[in-house]
């Protein structure tokens, strides 16, 4: 039998691993809240390392705290093939966003190991640091550091809601994991392929098994700060107030109007807002809110983003406004080599496919700056994600991992 047919994905083991991983940060209704660079994150990583040690994978971390599991190939000088995803979640996340791609990678190398398969190239499974960006904005700080898009200490001064700095949290993680061998950031890498839930409704609604992902739309994140003046809610005349809350509301509404898109392709979200002093009977002196802007066309994303400063300024009546762009990931096309490998693997394993772009961003966007990259999607029930109700069935997950394993075999033997 050739290598492709020798190895068998163990769906029960994969599902068990996913459910055990979901216990690290479990919240009601099958949700997960496992924030990056926390004790929960470290506990989950230790569990992953324990599972990986059962097949003798070598473990390492880099200075961005990306976690690496490596199985050797017959040619140790050959550049490795990478797979993986992220283990951090949204605050009200699901059991599969990110975690699936890491576990799928582990399941694939475990199945190959048990079948006695040794590919020409080494294969590495990576758990990227802080893909979500919900504790520390922006997301993808681990993969942006790894590919050299940004220096690893770019975000050291970013604070979480408790006032902890990213740089301190990263140092804490590396300190707790100082027993794990350190490796440098960066390649060399032959190719990267990431398995992920679709986080949209298309595969399920069309009754298809696998998304052959062609690329990722562009994402831009901004932080807006509206500065006013605190005052007494009972005594300060409205005519004399510099109410940061009211000007922030005006700015958000004006931005929403400016980002209207009759084709419903543009994505504009204000998901986070912080108010100071955040007291019922004090006029707000400062409001900070986030902007998440996305579009598959770089020119449109650039043009709409260029509107933001003037739209905010025009909405100000009595306050001052500051705008910072803290994440710029322009649209990415995946490499034909990996797209073809995924398509071939899906067809060879008898799965129906859909070529599709990703509305969500992923670390693959940054891996593609270092090597040919691509992704494999599996269906999301009703397209739900970033929500505890996120669901993909064991069989659907196993199908994705089977396609991942065949893709890895193809790429790692080339
Ligand atoms: O926001 C995103 O697109 C990703 O799910 N973190
Ligand atoms: Mn994700
Ligand atoms: Mn996500």
Image (spheres, rainbow, N blue to C red):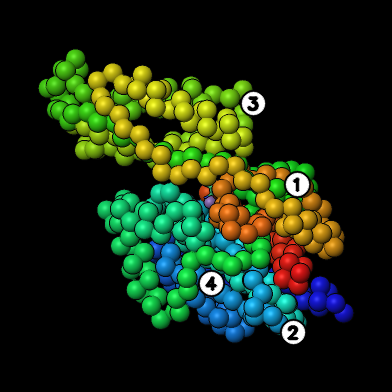
Q: Which residue is mark 3?
A: 263
Spatial separation of the CA atoms under disc 1 and disc 2: 33 Å
Lower position in the chain sequence, tag 2 or tag 3:
2
Q: Is residue 219 left or right of residue 108?
A: left
- Secondary structure at numbered mark 3: loop
Q: Which residue is mark 2?
A: 116
Q: Are marks 1 and 3 in contact (CB under 8 Å)?
A: no
Lower position in the chain sequence, tag 4 or tag 1:
4
Q: Is residue 410 left or right of residue 99?
A: right
The label on residue 68 is: 4
Assess disc 2: are there few (<14), some (14-19) or many (≥20) residues with their C-alpha within 10 Å of its C-alpha.
Answer: few
- Secondary structure at numbered mark 1: strand
Q: Is residue 359 left or right of residue 410?
A: left
Lower position in the chain sequence, tag 1 or tag 2:
2
Please tell me which residue is depicted at 59% across the width and 76% down the height of the picture.
Answer: 70
Q: Are marks 4 and 1 in contact (CB under 8 Å)?
A: no
Spatial separation of the CA atoms under disc 2 and disc 3: 51 Å
Asked if residue 370 is positioned above or below residue 78 in the image, the reply reads above
Q: Quadrant of the N terminus?
A: bottom right
Q: Quadrant of the C terminus?
A: bottom right
Check mark 3 vs ligand 1: CB closer than 8 Å? yes or no: no
Which quarter of the picture shows residue 169? bottom left
Asked if residue 144 is positioned above or below residue 82 in the image, the reply reads above
Please tell me which residue is depicted at 33% across the width and 68% down the height of the picture.
Answer: 172
Assess disc 1: are there few (<14), some (14-19) or many (≥20) residues with their C-alpha within 10 Å of its C-alpha.
Answer: some
Taking the view exactly as shown, the residue that stands out farthest to the right is: 1
User: Is residue 16 among what the camera can see?
Assistant: no
């Amino acid at each position: 039998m050739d290598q492709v047919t020798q190895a068998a994905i163990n769906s029960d083991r994969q599902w068990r691993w996913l459910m055990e991983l979901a216990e690290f940060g479990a919240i009601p209704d099958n949700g997960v809240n496992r924030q990056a660079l926390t004790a929960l994150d470290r506990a989950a990583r230790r569990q992953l390392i324990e599972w990986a040690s059962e097949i003798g994978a070598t473990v390492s971390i880099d200075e961005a705290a990306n976690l690496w599991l490596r199985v050797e190939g017959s040619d140790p000088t050959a550049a490795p093939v990478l797979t993986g995803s992220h283990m951090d979640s949204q605050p009200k996340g699901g059991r599969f966003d990110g975690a699936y791609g890491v576990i799928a990678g582990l399941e694939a190398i475990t199945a190959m190991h048990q079948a006695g398969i040794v590919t020409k190239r080494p294969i590495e499974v990576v758990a990227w640091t802080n893909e979500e960006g919900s504790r520390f904005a922006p997301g993808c700080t681990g993969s942006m550091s790894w590919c050299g898009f940004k220096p690893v200490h770019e975000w050291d001064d970013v604070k979480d809601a408790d006032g902890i700095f990213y740089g301190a949290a990263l140092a804490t993680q590396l300190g707790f994991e100082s027993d794990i061998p350190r490796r440098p950031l960066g390649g060399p890498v032959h190719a990267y392929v990431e398995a992920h839930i679709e986080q949209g409704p298309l595969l399920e609604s069309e009754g298809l098994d696998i998304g052959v992902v062609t690329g990722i739309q562009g994402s831009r994140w901004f932080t807006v700060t509206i500065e006013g003046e605190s005052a007494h809610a009972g005594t300060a005349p409205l005519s004399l107030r510099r109410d940061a809350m009211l000007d922030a509301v005006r700015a958000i509404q004006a931005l929403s109007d400016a980002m209207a898109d009759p084709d419903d392709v543009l994505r504009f979200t204000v998901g986070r807002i912080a108010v100071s002093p955040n007291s019922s009977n004090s006029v707000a002196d400062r409001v900070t809110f986030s902007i998440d802007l996305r579009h598959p066309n770089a020119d449109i994303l650039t043009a709409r983003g260029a509107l933001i400063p003037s739209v905010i300024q025009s909405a100000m009546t009595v306050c001052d406004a500051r705008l910072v762009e803290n994440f710029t990931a322009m649209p990415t096309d995946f490499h034909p080599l990996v797209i073809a490998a995924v398509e071939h693997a899906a067809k060879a394993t008898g799965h129906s496919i859909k070529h599709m772009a990703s509305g969500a961003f992923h670390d693959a966007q940054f891996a593609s700056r270092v090597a040919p990259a691509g992704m494999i999607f599996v269906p999301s029930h009703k397209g739900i994600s970033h929500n505890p109700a996120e669901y993909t069935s064991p069989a659907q997950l196993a199908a994705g991992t089977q396609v991942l394993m065949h893709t890895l075999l193809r790429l790692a033997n080339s």
